[in-house]
């Protein structure tokens, strides 16, 4: 992917560069950070994750299956005691809840793996090993006409290195 990469030592200059890049709309922005920082998350202001839908659907399927398996086993092997109902929802709520948590958690993990494309066999454009050691990086995916403007903006905000990626 073609674009411009800027490396930063400080978080505040990285955040300022991200905000300015978003205003100028020079291209898609990818940010690299050694740790999770809420300042970067707020500056990027990305869309909400779709992984929570996996959790919701997994939880609903889990609670449905938990009630169904408990009621099915009670109907298949009935233990009639004192004329009480064979299948009652009150005691099966525990089973339904536990299966809901289990399937919801497994669906969440599956959604995270699917949407983060794990395992990633190749590194992404603009990645540098310094971004795992303490520096911050911003990769702006843009064509050659906007690359000079992106380079100037990254240098203006204090990037220690700016280079074009092909």
Image (cartoon, grey):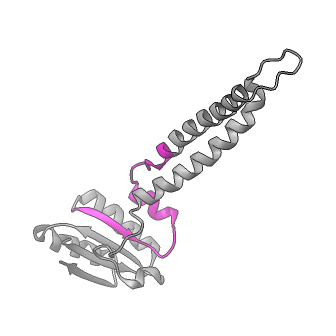
| Residue 64 lies within the magenta run | no
- From the viewer's side, name the closer residue of 135 and 154: 135
- From the viewer's side, name the closer residue of 33 and 112: 112
- From the viewer's side, name the closer residue of 41 and 71: 71
Q: Is residue 21 above or below residue 73?
A: below
Residue 101 figure quarter: top right
| Residue 53 lies within the magenta run | yes
Residue ID at (55%, 37%): 61
Residue 20 figure quarter: bottom left
Q: Is residue 35 above or below residue 23?
A: below
| Position of residue 97 measured from the top left corner of the image (x, y, whole percent) | 69, 38
Q: Residue furthest front?
A: 77
Q: Is residue 163 above or below residue 81?
A: below
Numbered circles on residues, count: 0
Q: Residue furthest right?
A: 82
Q: Tell me where the magenta segment starts and ends, as one range.
A: 27-54
Q: Quadrant of the N terminus?
A: bottom left
| Position of residue 130 measured from the top left corner of the image (x, y, whole percent) | 41, 85
Q: Residue furthest top?
A: 83
Residue ID at (56%, 36%): 60
- From the viewer's side, name the closer residue of 34 and 73: 73
Residue ID at (38%, 67%): 16
Q: Quadrant of the C terminus?
A: bottom left
| Position of residue 158 measured from the top left corner of the image (x, y, whole percent) | 34, 79
In the displayed structure image, the side of residue 72 where residue 28 appears, left or right: left
Q: Is residue 22 above or below residue 65?
A: below
Residue ID at (71%, 38%): 95
């Amino acid at each position: 992917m073609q674009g411009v990469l800027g490396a930063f030592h400080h978080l505040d200059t990285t955040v300022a560069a991200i905000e300015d890049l978003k205003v100028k709309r020079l291209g898609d922005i990818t940010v690299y950070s050694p740790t999770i920082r809420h300042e970067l998350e707020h500056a990027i202001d990305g869309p909400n994750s779709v992984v929570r839908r996996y959790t919701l659907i997994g939880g609903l399927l889990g609670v449905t299956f938990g009630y169904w398996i408990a009621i099915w086993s009670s109907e298949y092997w009935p233990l009639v005691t004192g004329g009480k109902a064979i299948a009652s929802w009150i005691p099966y709520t525990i089973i339904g809840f536990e299966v809901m948590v289990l399937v919801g958690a497994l669906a969440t993990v599956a959604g995270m793996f699917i949407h983060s494309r794990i395992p990633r066999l190749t590194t992404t454009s603009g990645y540098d090993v310094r971004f795992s050691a303490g520096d911050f990086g911003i990769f702006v995916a843009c064509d050659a006409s906007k690359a000079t403007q992106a380079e100037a903006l990254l240098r203006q905000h204090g990037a220690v290195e700016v280079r074009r990626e092909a």
